[in-house]
Image (cartoon, rainbow, N blue to C red):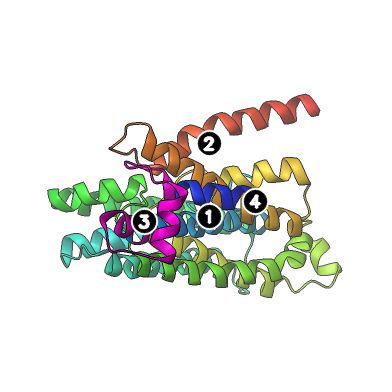
Amino acid sequence: MALVLLLAALSVMIGSTVFSPADVATALLAPTGGESDLVITGVRIPRMLLAIAAGAALSVAGVVMQALTRNPLADPGILGVNAGASFAVALGMTVFGISQYSATLWLAFAGAALASIAVAALGASSRGSQSAARLVLGGVAVGAVLAGATSALSMLNPKAYATMRLWEAGSLAGRDLGVSGLTLALVTGGVVVALLLAPGLNVLVLGEDTASSLGSRIRAVRGWSLVTIVVLCGAATAAVGPIAFVGLMVPHAVRAVVGADQRTVLAYSLLAGPALLLVADLIARSVIRPHEVPIGVVTAILGAPLLVALVVFRRRAS
């Protein structure tokens, strides 16, 4: 928690222009209306809050996904969340000419929700229950179809294609306090539900037969887990784009340190995700200052070596 607070402070101070702690304190406590005050309160703070919200959402959703599907490679893309959000944004930009973040936020959230509902329907058996294998296969199928449709729509409109390319690379720039506040509120609700589901997820990862014999309400846990994933991934993807590796990398790293108890993994992932995204954002803004690298590129560069290191570490430990 101390690390997250330190990184949040650095995120407000460091960028194309570096501000001192005194500048930040003045902008928050006694603003004069100058340019530095406007940058700090109108750009840096919303960006910092969005990084915390998106990092927490993606990492917690990754924990829930991996427990729900019993698949260690599960991430926000495996249930069609990213593909649904991308398709809805592409549809809004190319067909309806929508470009405002406030509008695309709801479009992406709706697209993520509808895609997840379609995956859940495909993953359901004739009795209405769902299996991990069906959910994964349904997510891959829906994601592939929607990704192809998104590419086709984007190619029809060069301007929309350029905007979509920037959004799909992942970015925290250009979002105001309203978008950050709404995302933070949605993520807070999703995180609370995820923490309440932790005991049920602990039983669910043992397998459906074992969970049933222990008296677990499998359908309720699975249903609320899907709702939680939609809220968390939908809100984060809608606000910042489909950022890679956070939902996959953070649960693995946390699990390697604290063990497999879902309650502990969720608690530490809730802090590790924002820390990772704040670090990635600082790198994205600093490496080619005054320009910036898409944050999705930075998380991919950071994530791949870490996952390789975790694989090597576990191999040696075994």
Residue 23 magenta:
yes
Contact flag, marks 4 and 2 (Cβ < 8 Å): no
The image's mark for residue 216 is: none
Between 236 and 135, the one nearer to me in the picture: 236
For discs 3 and 4, the disc positioned in front in the rendered view? 3
For discs 4 and 2, the disc positioned in front in the rendered view? 4
Q: Which residue is drawn at 60% across and 57% down?
A: 60
Instruction: Identify the residue position indicated by label 1 in the image.
Output: 58
Instruction: Identify the residue position indicated by label 2 in the image.
Output: 303
The image's mark for residue 40 is: 3
The image's mark for residue 2 is: 4
At label 1, the amino acid type is Leu
Secondary structure at badge 2 equals helix
At label 3, the amino acid type is Ile
Secondary structure at badge 4 equals helix
Report the magenta residues as a range. Answer: 12-41
